[in-house]
Amino acid sequence: MIRRNFLELLGGAGLYTTLKPLMPEYLEKVSLPGTDEDYWAQIQQAYTTSPQIINLNNGGVSPSPQIVQDAVERYNKYVNEAPSYYMWRILDQGREPLRENLAKYAGCSPEEIAFNRNATEALDTVILGLPLKAGDEVVLNPYDYPNMLHAWRQREMRDGIKLKFVKFPIGTEDETKIVQAYQEQMGPQTRVVHITHVINWNGQILPTKKIADAAHKIGAEVLIDGAHSFAHLDYKIPDLGGDYFGTSLHKWLSAPIGTGMLWIKKEKISKIYPLVPNDSPKSDNIRKFENLGTRPFPLEQAIGIALRFQEAIGNVRKENRLRFLKNYWAEDAAKMPKIKINTPFNNSCALAHVSVEGKTGGEIESYLFNKFKIHTSPIQWEDLNGVRVTPHVYTTLKDLDRLKEALYQLSKA
Ligand SMILES: Cc1ncc(COP(=O)(O)O)c(C=O)c1O
C-alpha cells in the first residue's frame, strides 16, 4: 500500500527509476512498528532455524541467514583450492571495500574501524592497550560483561589502577538516576568510564551519550561496549559520544560466528597498543589492530553479505520489530501472578529479563525447555534471578504465544 502510494506520488515509472535508490530509506521512515506479518514471514524463511526448538536466546549469539552461511561455504571452498593464494591474494582484496561499507553503515570513517573476532577482542584491545598508571581510576558497572570486568581486574592486579564501581539501580526507567550513579564515582583521578550500551543481563539501554558527556567534562575517556546494541538499535557510532567502541558482528548483524569490530576515534588510535603488535604499534593506522595472524578469511568476507541483509531490512524497521516482539510477550507476562519483568519497558528493545516468584533462573529455564522446548538463558547475576528472553527478526508471534502460555502455567504451578 505504502509502496503503491509512493509510486503514484512519483507519477510514473521513469521518475521511479531515477529515484529508486531513495526507496528503502523513505520506506523505512514511513513503515510502522513492525507488525506486517507477511513481511516478517519472508524474513523468517531467510533463516534455517530449527522448527523443533523455539530459540529465545538470540542474545547469546545470532544465527546467520542462509545467504550468509552460503557465502562462508563458498569462500571456504575457494580458500581450500590453494589456501595461501586465495586467502592472501584474493579474499584479502575484499577487506578494504568491506571496511568502507561497514563504516558507512556505522556512520564513521573507514580509517577508524578494524575487524577482529568478537567484542571481547575489540574491547580488550582498548582495556589492555590504554596507557594507564598506578592510581588512575576507571569507572565501571557491576552489570558490565564479565570478560570486560576480568580484563579491568587484570589491569588492577598488574598495574595498580583503581576500579570504581557504580551503585547501579538495575531496571530503573530513571535516566537521571543512572547518570548520577556514574557521576558519583567520577573524580580527578578518573581516566576512563566504561559503559555497556545495552546491558546483556536484562536488556536495559543506558543513556550512553549523557554519561559520556559527563565523563568528558572531567577529562576522562569513554569506552563503549556495543556488543548488544550494534545492528539492534538505530544509531551511528559517533552519536554515542565515546572515544572507543567494540562490538561483535555475530550478534545482531547476523554475521558469521567469530566476527567482531573495533572503532577508535582517529586521533586516539596512536596511543592504544595493539594486543597483537605489528611492526609499528604506535602508528595511527587502524589496520595495526588486524595483525591477528592466519585467521578465517571466509568468515570475515561473509560479513559483507550480512550487512546487505541488514540494510535490506533497515535499522528503523528492525528496531521497531524487535521492540514490538519484546512488548508482545512481556506486557502480557507482566500481568500474570508471580511474574516480574526486570527490564524497563521504555529503555529496552529485544531483550528482557523475567523472574517468577519462588523460582530460580535455572528452574525457570529448565521448565521452559523441558516442557515447551523453549530455549532461554538463565540469568542469576547481582540482583537478578530469572531468565533472559531474546527474540530475533525470525521469531513468530506463534512462538511468543507459546512462551506466554508456558509462563502462565509456570506462574500457577
Ligand atoms: C555486553 C556484552 N559485551 C561483550 C560480550 C562479549 O561478546 P563475545 O563473546 O562475542 O566476545 C557480550 C557477549 O554476550 C556481551 O553481552
Image: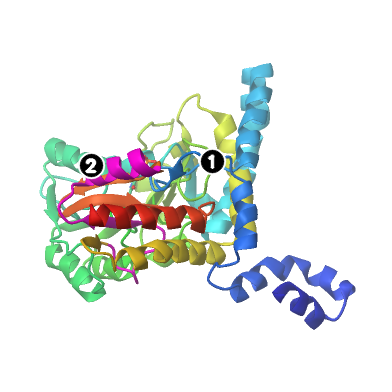
Q: State which region is magenta.
A: 343-372
Q: Residues within 10 Å of mark 2 (few under 14, many from 20)?
A: some
Label 1 with label 2: CB-CB less than 8 Å:
no
- Quarter of the image where the N terminus is located: bottom right
Q: Where is residue 189 drawn, in percent x and y?
A: 13, 58
* Residue 193 visible to an observer of this rendering: no
Give residue 218's position: percent from left, percent from top: 21, 67
Residue 355 versus residue 154 in the image, above or below: below
Image position of 17 with respect to 262: above or below: below
Q: Residues within 10 Å of mark 1 (few under 14, many from 20)?
A: some
- Label 1 and label 2: CA atoms lie apart by 24 Å
Q: Is mark 2 within 8 Å of ligand 1?
A: no
Q: Is residue 134 left or right of residue 267?
A: left
Of the residues shown, which amino acid type is indicated by label 2?
Answer: Gly
Among the two numbered marks 1 and 2 on one chain, the one whose residue lies closer to the N terminus: 1
The one nearer the camera, 245 or 309, is: 309
Quadrant of the rendered image containing residue 203: bottom left
Tell whether position 362 is magenta.
yes
Please name the residue that numbered disc 1 is placed on.
49
**Residue at 58% across, 40% down:** 48
Mark 1 C-beta to ligand 1 under 8 Å: no
Q: In this picture, is 385 found above or below 29?
A: above
Q: Is 149 contained in the magenta span? A: no
Residue 343 in view, yes or no = yes
Image position of 376 (left or right of 88): left
Badge 1 marks a residue whose secondary structure is: loop
Q: As rendered, which of 186 and 58 lies closer to the eye?
A: 58
Figure check: 306 above or below 185: above
**Image quadrant in which you'd find residue 182:** bottom left
The numbered disc on residue 362 is 2
Of 23 and 42, nearer the camera is: 42
